[in-house]
């Protein structure tokens, strides 16, 4: 005879708990937004490396900082959601954008000698009326060389007193945005007005105490369309061709391109040019109000024995660009 066990009465189900998770539609929307953001970041990152194929692709290269930040966020989101594929794709975007920015964090060797040349590069923005701000900047820094981009005759007259200590000069003002001017404490020789890519440039040789230094001041056009982009890139080719013939040189100006641009990189590589901003971390010159969150398009490029002693992006001076100050040594 078997043992009869008492049958338990079924207990009442506990009161259903409210689902702490977000509604299904919200979770799906969040996932869709994360996926689309990830695809946008991956696409923008890829396009940025294909700037030599199409001018529109090259525009993506200028926003590496933003692409890197977005890639980090979507990768963290994918990890939290345990989406391995999305996390892997996001990690690749982080690595790609980070690697492209790596030159800004690696400085070159310091100069061996004590000779110095201080340089101030300012895109004044032709329509900017803050003459006093830039005059005060020049007075405060007392540079050996001042390079102005976009000056018209009005600007040259307004800054004449501030630049009186720099007796050697070459001025090429214009009524558009492509005026240029150079002012030097040391003699300027072999002055030439050039037009690489069809846009004005100034070339000279500075007789510094440490020797003669060839210089080119440039302002290629902004890449606003296929035609202007082609002209900018043609300017880069001509700059590289000239610089490659010089044992050492400085090329400076508003290049309307960041370090990450494929045509800009090609120019650097073909002429063995180095950016003075190397090792300075995240810096930006345009648009001026954004500071380091802007993009660096105002460059000082070096070839040969001159090295960077000091580099700084200057304050707001009314222009849409921030000035760049560089101390060179050898």
Image (cartoon, helix red, strand yellow):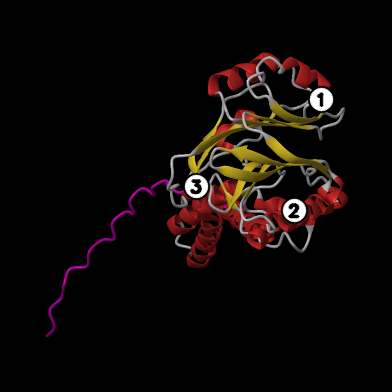
Q: Quadrant of the N terminus?
A: bottom left
Q: Is residue 133 above or below residue 190?
A: above
The percent position of residue 250, horizontal first and vertical second, equals 63, 46
The residue at 36%/48% (across/down) is: 15
SS for tag 3? loop
Query: Does residue 153 show up?
Result: yes
Q: CA distance from mark 2 to mark 3?
A: 53 Å
Question: For mark 1, what is the residue?
Answer: 152
Q: Residues within 10 Å of mark 3 (few under 14, many from 20)?
A: few
The residue at 66%/53% (across/down) is: 61
26 with respect to 108 (left or right): right
CB atoms of marks 1 and 3 within 8 Å:
no
Q: Which mark is nearer the camera, 1 or 3?
A: 1
Question: For mark 2, what is the residue?
Answer: 236
Q: Is residue 302 above or below residue 288?
A: below
**What's the magenta region?**
1-24
Between 46 and 306, the one nearer to me in the picture: 306
> Does the magenta run of residues contain 187?
no
The percent position of residue 23, horizontal first and vertical second, equals 53, 48
Between 235 and 143, the one nearer to me in the picture: 143
- In primary-sequence order, the first of circles 1 and 3 is 3
Q: CA distance from mark 1 to mark 3?
A: 60 Å
SS for tag 2? helix
């Amino acid at each position: 005879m078997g043992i009869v066990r008492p049958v338990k009465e079924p207990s009442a189900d506990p009161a259903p708990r409210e689902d702490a998770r977000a509604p299904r539609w919200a979770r799906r929307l969040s996932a869709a937004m994360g996926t689309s953001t990830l695809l946008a970041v991956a696409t923008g990152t890829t396009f940025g490396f294909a700037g030599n194929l199409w001018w529109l692709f090259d525009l993506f290269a200028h926003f590496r900082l933003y692409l890197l930040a977005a890639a980090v966020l979507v990768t963290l989101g994918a990890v939290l959601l345990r989406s391995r594929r999305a996390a892997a794709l996001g990690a690749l975007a982080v690595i790609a954008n980070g690697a492209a920015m790596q030159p800004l964090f690696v400085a070159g060797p310091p100069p061996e000698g004590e000779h110095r040349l201080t340089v101030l590069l300012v895109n004044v923005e032709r329509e900017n009326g803050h003459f006093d701000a830039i005059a005060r900047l020049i007075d405060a820094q007392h540079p050996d060389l001042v390079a102005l981009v976009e000056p018209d005759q009005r600007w040259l007259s307004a800054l004449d007193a501030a630049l009186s200590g720099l007796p050697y000069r070459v001025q090429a003002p214009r009524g558009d945005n492509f005026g240029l001017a150079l002012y030097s404490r040391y003699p300027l020789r072999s002055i030439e007005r050039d037009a690489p890519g069809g846009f004005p440039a100034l070339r000279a040789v500075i007789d510094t105490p440490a020797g003669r230094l060839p210089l080119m001041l440039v302002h290629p056009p902004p890449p606003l369309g296929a035609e202007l982009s082609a002209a900018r890139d043609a300017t880069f080719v001509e700059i590289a061709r000239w610089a490659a013939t010089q044992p050492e040189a400085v090329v400076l100006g508003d290049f309307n391109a960041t370090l990450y641009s494929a045509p800009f990189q090609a120019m650097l590589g073909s002429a063995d040019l180095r950016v003075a901003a190397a090792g300075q971390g995240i810096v930006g010159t345009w648009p001026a109000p954004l500071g380091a969150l802007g993009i660096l398009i105002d460059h000082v490029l070096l070839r040969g024995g001159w090295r960077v002693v000091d580099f700084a992006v200057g304050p707001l001076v009314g222009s849409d660009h921030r000035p760049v100050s560089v101390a060179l040594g050898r």
